[in-house]
Image (tube, rainbow, N blue to C red):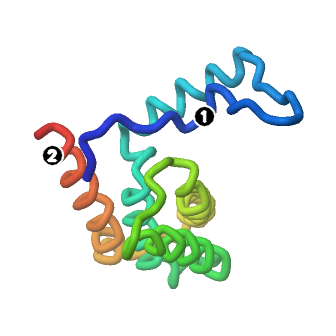
Amino acid sequence: LVHDEVERPVMGQIPPNDWGFRLAPNPVRTWLDRGARWSAHTPLGWPVWWMALAIGLLVVAPGLPSRRLVIPLALSGLLYGLGYLPASVACELRYHLWTMLAVLIAALIAASDMAGGTMPDRRRLLLAAAPVLLVTILCVAWRLA
C-alpha cells in the first residue's frame, strides 16, 4: 500500500566503473522502460497482487492435470514474495521479479488446463478469485485516497 512514485524498473544509466562500461540509449530499452513504468501503476506491477494470484492458483491447482507444475511454481513465487514481509529491504520492482514470473508461469499453465476443458467447480473458482479481488480493491482504493 504505497502512494510514492515507483522506482524506475529498467536502469537508465550505470554508475561510473573501472571498466568504462556504459549503457547506450536504444529504442528497445526505452520501450521496455515505458512498459515497466506503466505496469507498475496497475495490478500487473504490484507484487502483492501476484501473491494473491498465487493463493488463488493454489486453491484451483489440486484439480488440474498440471498440478505438479502449478503448485510448486505458485508456492515458490508466494513464499519468495512473503520473504520480504518481516523486514522489507526491497521496494524496487527488480527484487520481486521471481514472485511475478513464477506466478505468471503457473497462471499460464493453469489457464491452459482450463482452456483444455479441465474446469474447477464454481465454488472453488470463486474462492480462488477472492484474494485477487480483495487485493485489487484495497490497492486501488489506497492509491486513489
Residue at 70% in and 15% down: 27
Q: Is residue 137 above or below residue 83?
A: above
- 117 or 111: nearer the viewer: 111
Q: Quadrant of residue 9?
A: top right
Residue 118 location, quadrant = bottom right
In the rendered image, the quadrant that contains the C terminus is top left
Amino acid residing under circle 2: Ala
Looking at the image, residue 45 sits to the left or right of residue 99; the answer is: left
- In the picture of the structure, the residue carrying the numbered disc 2 is 141
Neighbor class of circle 2 (other Cα within 10 Å; few <14, some 14-19, many 20+) is few
Pinpoint residue 7: horizontal percent, then vertical percent. Answer: 45, 38
x and y percent of residue 25 in the render?
72, 16
Q: Is residue 131 above or below residue 3?
A: below
Mark 1 lies on a secondary structure that is loop
- SS at mark 2? helix
Q: Nearer the viewer, mark 2 or mark 1?
A: 1
Q: Amino acid at mark 1?
A: Val
- Residue sticking out furthest to the front: 18
Question: Mark 2 to mark 1: distance in Å?
Answer: 27 Å
Which residue does the image show at 41% across and 73% down from the upper left?
55
Which comes before the other along the chain, label 2 or label 1?
1
Badge 1 is on which residue? Answer: 10
Residue at coordinates 45% horizontally, 69% vertically from top-left? 84
Rendering coords of residue 113 (x, y %): 60, 66
